[in-house]
Image (cartoon, helix red, strand yellow):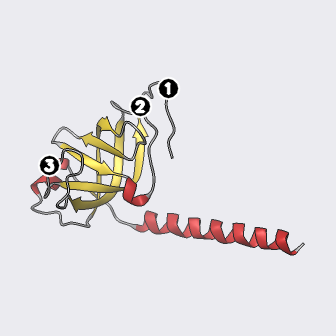
């Protein structure tokens, strides 16, 4: 009987932690910007919470841990791995609304992006469009 009670207490604690994390993410004020504004770097500092929207032009072929979004003003890498989530595969051509924080590629290259290039560490991604078959779920 004690094991069953401990199981339910653990489940409730996990659900409460997940709810708190969701509320914290919703409280962030994301500034809607263009990719050009991020790439120029003049007004957006590293760590700033931003929202971009554009077409997915590239994606991680194996796990969906990154994507490249183009909003018509430029292309930008969105890295999902630091927040431990992945996207389904086969999303190229769909629209992505990305919420995250601005970061800068360090000494090591990220894909083909050179050190000093801005990118976004994705915290939330909303996908719209006609999903191509087969849609492969990762993670």
Residue bearing mark 1: 134
Disc 1 versus disc 3: nearer the observer: 1
Q: Residue 86 at what x, y percent from top left? A: 44, 47
Q: Which residue in the protein does label 3 denote?
A: 36
Please indicate whether residue 28 sits to the left or right of residue 48 in the image: right
In the figure, residue 83 lies in which quadrant? bottom left
SS class, disc 2: loop
Marks 2/1: CA–CA distance = 7 Å
Could you tell whether 126 is left or right of 31 in the image?
right
**Residue 90 % position (x, y):** 41, 31
Q: Provide residue 87's location: percent of width, then percent of height.
A: 44, 43
- Distance from disc 1 to disc 3, alpha carbons, whole Å, reads 33 Å
- Look at 20% across and 49% down and name the residue there: 34
Residue 91 lies, with reference to residue 97, above or below; the image says above
Of 139 and 99, nearer the camera is: 139
State yes or no: discs 2 and 3 in contact (Cβ < 8 Å).
no
The image quadrant that residue 103 belongs to is: bottom left
Q: Considering the numbered disc 1 on the image, is that residue within a helix, a strand or a loop?
A: loop
């Amino acid at each position: 009987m004690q094991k069953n009670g401990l199981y339910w207490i653990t489940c409730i604690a996990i659900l409460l932690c997940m709810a708190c994390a969701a509320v914290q993410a919703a409280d962030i004020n994301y500034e809607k910007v263009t990719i050009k504004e991020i790439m120029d770097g003049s007004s957006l500092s590293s760590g700033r919470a931003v929202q971009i929207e554009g077409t997915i032009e590239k994606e991680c072929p194996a796990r969906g841990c990154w994507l490249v979004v183009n909003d018509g003003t430029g292309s930008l890498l969105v890295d999902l791995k630091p927040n431990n989530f992945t996207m389904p595969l086969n999303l190229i051509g769909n629209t992505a609304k990305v919420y995250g924080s601005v970061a800068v590629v360090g000494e090591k290259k990220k894909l083909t992006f050179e050190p000093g290039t801005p990118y976004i560490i994705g915290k939330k991604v909303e996908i719209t469009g006609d999903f191509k078959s087969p849609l492969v779920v990762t993670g």
